Image: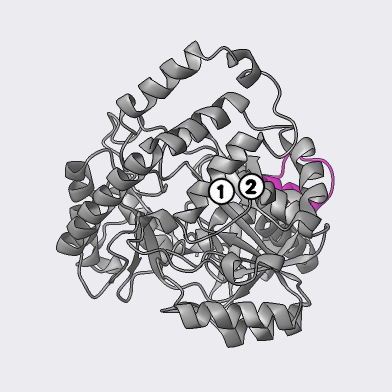
Amino acid sequence: MTNWRPDLEDQSGPRYLAIAEALARDVAQGRLAPGDRLPTHRDLAWHLGVTVGTVTRAYGEAERRGLIAGEVGRGTFVREQLPSAPPTFQDLGSEDGLIDLSYNFPALATDHALFREELEGMARDPELNRHLGYLLGPGRDSHRAAAADWLKRAGLDARPEEIVVTCGAQHAMFLAAAALTRPGEVILTEALTYYGIKSIAEALERQLYGVALDDQGLVPDSLEAAIRSSGARVLYCIPTLQNPTTTVLPEARRRQIVEICRRHDVMIIEDDIYSFLLEEPATPLTALAPERSFYATSLSKCVAPGLRIGLLRAPLAFHEGIATALRASTLMPSGFMAELAARLIRSGKAEQAAEAKCQEAQARQSLARTVLPSGQLVTHPRCFHAWLTLPRPWRHEDFAAEARRRGVMVGSARVFAVGRQPVPHAVRLCLHAASSRRQLRSGLEILTGILRESPAEVPALV
């Protein structure tokens, strides 16, 4: 336990807010590190001369801000903090030697030649000014038709009029959540989930409720129990190459999930950003239940993040709500980028870019399986990331902190956890964030070395 004592001098306003602000300041300035255990409510209250209830409110406020988390029977700990913005490709492997495996970037920049021809064609297009103007509504007919063709490769037969062009998949998820729920309502997610949905829930003032996972993905019985206990009417999930655990939901279980959602009238937000990596597409939940499914994907991972073009397929009955959220959030996606994306799809160049990334995924996964202990690694041969389970007595916060100290950034399981359920001791490794396979090998070898040690053997930081 740390001997943390907040400095409350010159602090006005309620004491609980002053304590929460002091905690936030000390985390930001490095006085408190991820994994540090905070004083008990009673000890801190005695030291500060306040009531235990005041400290409880302060810790509650800090937990709401994502600064700390409580674990039953163990205490309250400082959470790993995500940077306010991901590093750029130029930042990866920078002069300080940091190897960042914490962000799920695509490994390869798309071949410039694939873009050059289409950009030159756009420059000669007499309708160039049209592409540079406002793009109001769900997108131009030609863009939505190209998008429908692209979705066929994921096993989804969508009509162009069902598709809304968005500013990436995160934006598509935001629009779906805004159209389907109201402030204070509950969205079901996997118990470990992509942290982007956590940001969306916070921005929209929605509550998340975690549903249990196993080695095949979302557990149907747990989903049904969660629907009954939470009263939720929306499920967000990642059936294919789940983030962070890499599972692919089996066909039979997909049908079970859909049947449960139909029986309880639950809508589905399906995040299918990684399905392009599979050799044979898994059946999207949306293909099984189009009347209640919102399907979100983008060209960021498979072509290029800089396009910022996403696709949201949704039942037509909900398009008015989506349009309202679109106007309120970004007004419109880039018409220029939407046109470029459509041309890349029609010419086959988007397919070429995606295939190159699939090949690199296989190579990096093979490297990870060679370097890391097989008993700790949970992954898929064509996935961008891997899930590294930690041997006792390593804890996720301690391992992430020690890896960072040795120059490797990883994603602690805490970042992906929803609610107060026990957090597994594991970390996510983004194999494609490293700038090269050589850099990836270096980072994985460092992690392997840490796994061979015990936390007691790691020298204390002074």
Q: Residue 338 or 141: which is nearer the viewer?
A: 141
Side of 359 relative to 277 (left or right): left
Q: Dot 2, crowdedness within 10 Å: few (<14), some or many (≥20)?
A: some
Is residue 390 or residue 188 the one in the foreground? 188
The quadrant in which residue 291 appears is: bottom right
Q: Which mark is residue 394?
A: none
Number of numbered callouts drawn = 2
Which residue in the protein does label 1 denote? Answer: 148
Q: Nearer the viewer, residue 187 or 144?
A: 144
Describe the element under mark 2 as helix, strand or loop: helix
Q: CA distance from mark 2 to mark 1?
A: 6 Å
Q: Which residues are magenta?
A: 7-23
Residue 323 position, x and y percent, is 78, 43
Q: Cβ–Cβ below 8 Å for labels 2 and 1?
A: yes
Q: From the viewer's perspective, tell me whether residue 39 is left or right of residue 369.
A: right
Question: Hey, what amino acid is under mark 1?
Answer: Ala
Rendering coords of residue 193 (x, y %): 54, 63
